[in-house]
Amino acid sequence: MASVSQIFERTVRKFETRAPLDPADRQALYDLPFEIRSIDPNRYIVREGDRPPGATLIVEGLAFRQKVTIDGGRQILSVHIPGDFVDLEGSLLRVADHNVQALTRCEVAIVPRDAIVALIDSHAKIAHAMWVDTLIDASIYREWIVNVGRRDSRSGMCHLLCEFARRLEAAGLGNSAGYELPMTQEQLADALGITPVHVNRILRDLDREGLIVRDKRFVRVPSWEALRKCGGFSELYLHLDQRVVNTPMAATA
Amino acid sequence: MASVSQIFERTVRKFETRAPLDPADRQALYDLPFEIRSIDPNRYIVREGDRPPGATLIVEGLAFRQKVTIDGGRQILSVHIPGDFVDLEGSLLRVADHNVQALTRCEVAIVPRDAIVALIDSHAKIAHAMWVDTLIDASIYREWIVNVGRRDSRSGMCHLLCEFARRLEAAGLGNSAGYELPMTQEQLADALGITPVHVNRILRDLDREGLIVRDKRFVRVPSWEALRKCGGFSELYLHLDQRVVNTPMAATA
DNA sequence: CGTTAGGTTGACTTGATTCAACAACAGTGG
DNA sequence: CCACTGTTGTTGAATCAAGTCAACCTAACG
C-alpha cells in the first residue's frame, strides 16, 4: 500500500500548494482506483477528438500537448511532469481538442472518469485545487502565446530554457544551474514555432556566447541572470508561490 | 430589479451551457452584489501584478487580455465579450499575471472578491461551470499558440476572423456571414504577433481575392467555406456545444 | 480648421526558412 | 564484431515571408 500511495504523492503535494487539503481529501486521492501503464516515447496518450475513458496521471517521465495544423505543422503547447494530470479536460469537456504525446518513456496511472467525477463532486477542496491548477496552466499558455508571438527565436529559446529550469527545480527534478534538457531540437522547434535548423543555430550561438554550456542534451547555465535577461523571463506566470490565503476554504482548513 | 438581473443574464445563460444550474444557483448569481462602472476604450481593467479587489464582469462592450514584453512588444492573448468574467483568476490566484484592457467602451460590473469566493464555496454547480469555462478559455489559448506559432500570417488572419465570426454568432452578437470587426489593424497585429503594416497588406490581399469584403471595419464573408479553409479553422476548440452530460452534477440536475 | 488616430502603399532590410549534404551515434542483426 | 539503418545534430548557400522606415491619405472631432 505504501508503494501504491506513492503514485499520487506528487499530485497531493502539488495540490497542497494550490489549496489546503485536509486528511480526508488526501485519503480520497490515495484511494483513487487506477491502472498503471507504460508508454513509449512519442506514443500518443490522448488524441484530438477522443473521449478518453479516464484521466491520465504522469507518474514518471515527461509528456507534451500538441496540435497539428492542416498543412502538417506541429505546435507543442506545453510540457508536463510527474504529478500532472494530462487530460482532466477529458473528464469535464466533451472531447479532447488536442493531442498528448509521451516525451520520454512514461509511467502513467489511468484513473476512470467516473472516479474523477465522483472525487470532484464530493471533495470541494480537491476540485478547487484542480481548478487553480487549470488556471495556472492557462497562465502558462498565455506566456507561450507571448513567446511564439512577440519574442524573436533567440529570446524565445532563452525563455523556454528558463521555464524548464524553474519548473524542474520547483518539482524537485533538477537544478536551475544545469539540467538534462529532455527534448530533441525538432521538439524545441515545435515548441517555439520555428524550424529545427534554426534551433540548432540558436543553441550554437547561445553556447558560443556563453549563455549556456552544452554537453549532449545537458544544459549548464553559467549565469542565470544573463539567461533570464535574454529571455525576458519573469516567473510570476508560473505561480509557484500559489498558496491560497484568503478563500473560506483556506480559512476552514 | 428586472434591470438588475439583466446584468447577469448573459453569464447565467453561458454557465447553463457549461453545467446545468438549478434555480437556487441562478438566484445566487442574480443576487451577487456589484458596482457598475463605465470604461473608456484602451483603459486598463486589470494590471499585471495587481491583486484586484473584485472580479470584473463585462456587461456591454469588448475587452482583451494582453502582455507586454521587456522590449515593448504587446501580445494580445484573448478577446472577451459580454457575459465573461475577465479576472476570475484575480479571486483565486495571488496576483494578475497579465493585463486586461477595454477594447471598445465597456460597461462592467465589479463583484467583490468575497462575494465571488462565497459563491463558489457554496454553489458547487456554479464553481463547476466556472471551472469548465476556464478549461474552455485554456483551449482557446492553445489554439492561439498554434495560430501565432505555426500558421503564416495569412492563415492566422483567416483563422482569427473565423473565430470572431463564430463566437459573436454563438453569443447572439453578430452573424458569421458578416460582422463589425471591433479591432484596429494595430490590435489585430498584436493578436497575430505581426506588424500593423503587414496586417494591412494581408487584409487588402484577402479583399482583392474575394475571401472577405471590407467596408470600413465591417467584414462580409462571401464564402464561409473558403475563409474556413484558408484559416484551417475547426471550431472544436471553442467547445460551443459544451453541455455537460455525464457528471453526477448533471445527473442530479 | 488644425490635430490626431487609423489606414495605405512603396522600397529596402532582415530573421527565419528551405534545401541539401554530411557527421555522430545508437540499435539491430548477420 | 562490423556493416547497415535510422534518428538526431550540424553547417552552408539561396530564398522568402515579414519587418522597418517613411511618406501620405482619410475621417473624426474639439
Image (cartoon, coloured by chain):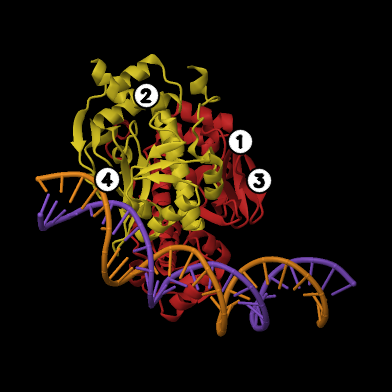
Chain colours: A red, B yellow, C purple, D orange
Q: Which numbered mark, 3 or 4, is in the foreground of this view?
A: 4
The CA distance from mark 3 to mark 2 is: 41 Å
The CA distance from mark 3 to mark 1 is: 18 Å
A208 or B189: nearer the eye? B189
Chain letter belonging to callout 4 = B
> Residue B184, relative to residue B175: is it above or below?
below
- Give the amino acid at mark 4: Gln
- Give the amino acid at mark 2: Val
Chain letter belonging to callout 3 = A
- On the image, numbered disc 4 is attached to which residue? B101
The CA distance from mark 2 to mark 4 is: 24 Å
Q: Determine whether label 3 and label 4 are within 8 Å by CB.
A: no
Q: Which numbered mark, 3 or 1, is in the foreground of this view?
A: 1
- On the image, numbered disc 3 is attached to which residue? A37
- On the image, numbered disc 2 is attached to which residue? B12
Residue at point 39%, 29% (across, down): B127
Helix, strand or loop status at disc 1: loop
